[in-house]
Image (spheres, rainbow, N blue to C red):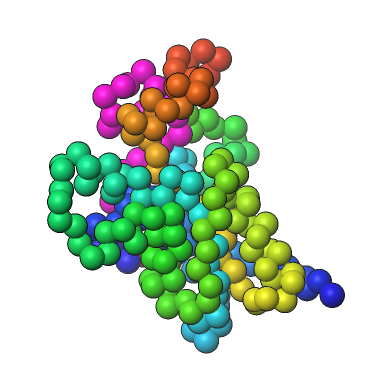
Amino acid sequence: MLASNYDGMDRSTVLGLIAADEAMNGSLLSRRESRIVNVFVGSSKGGLNNLLSACSTRRTKVPPDFLMESLHTATSDAIARQFGFDGLRMAYISSCTTGIHSIIMGAKYIAEGRGEIVLAGATEASINPLMLAGYESMELFQKTPQCLSVQ
Amino acid sequence: MSKRVVITSLGAITAGGCGISRLWHSAIEGQSMIQRLKGIDVESYIGAQVDDLIICNYNA
């Protein structure tokens, strides 16, 4: 997939697609097997950049897929579309543990015999002034590089 | 009866670069991916940020 094809997608979705592409290349799944893949890829902030961009430009008209591209399920949907998966599309969300939570739920899904293959993980693109202000307000963010090697 | 679950493949894009091998190499070498954040007004913050060039240069 060429980088130019990412136009209109939120950064979190693009990152998720690139990671999914590597996983799919390594999986050696056949085309038939790929059709039954379930996607459990979450994003705790979702398409935050898309939403903020639309707000900052005071747009009153948006494309029909704007909301779908901005929700927490946007990356699961994009991966399923990109690779032709017909399975379940889910987005488990649990803040910083979204990735491991998704993997656990994917493993559980297979262990219970509800599916054969799950592509699971998480993606995040939340480095922007608004989110940083939120982290700072919660006193979660290290603002000065004390004890860390910084280039 | 619980079915056996195996991991057959991995994929990652991180501040260390694109791909599992880069992430693994950074981890075992103890390389920090933390640096000053780019592209935002508040430059005093640090974090692990994926460089835009990694995305722009990616062609599957």
Per the picture, the main secondary structure of the magenta-coloured stretch is loop
Judged left or right of residue A84, residue A50 is left
Q: Is residue B53 visible?
A: no
Q: Is residue A130 visible?
A: yes
Task: Point out the image quarter for the C terminus of chain A.
Answer: top left
Judged left or right of residue A142, residue A102 is right
Return the x and y of residue A104 as percentages of the image width and height: 67, 57
Report which quarter residue B30 is drawn in.
top right
Residue at 55%, 80% (x, y): give it: A36
Return the x and y of residue A146 as percentages of the image width and height: 51, 13
Residue at 29%, 47% (x, y): give it: A51
Furthest residue in direction front, as rendered:
A60
Task: Point out the image quarter for the N terminus of chain A.
Answer: bottom left
Judging depth in this view, the residue of A145 and B16 nearest the camera is A145
Residue at 31%, 22% (x, y): give it: B42
In magenta segment, residue B41: yes
| Highlighted magenta segment, given as a residue range | B36-56
Furthest residue in direction right, as rendered:
B1
Judged left or right of residue B52, residue A38 is right
Return the x and y of residue A135 as percentages of the image width and height: 46, 27
Return the x and y of residue A90 as percentages of the image width and height: 52, 64
Q: How many marks?
A: 0
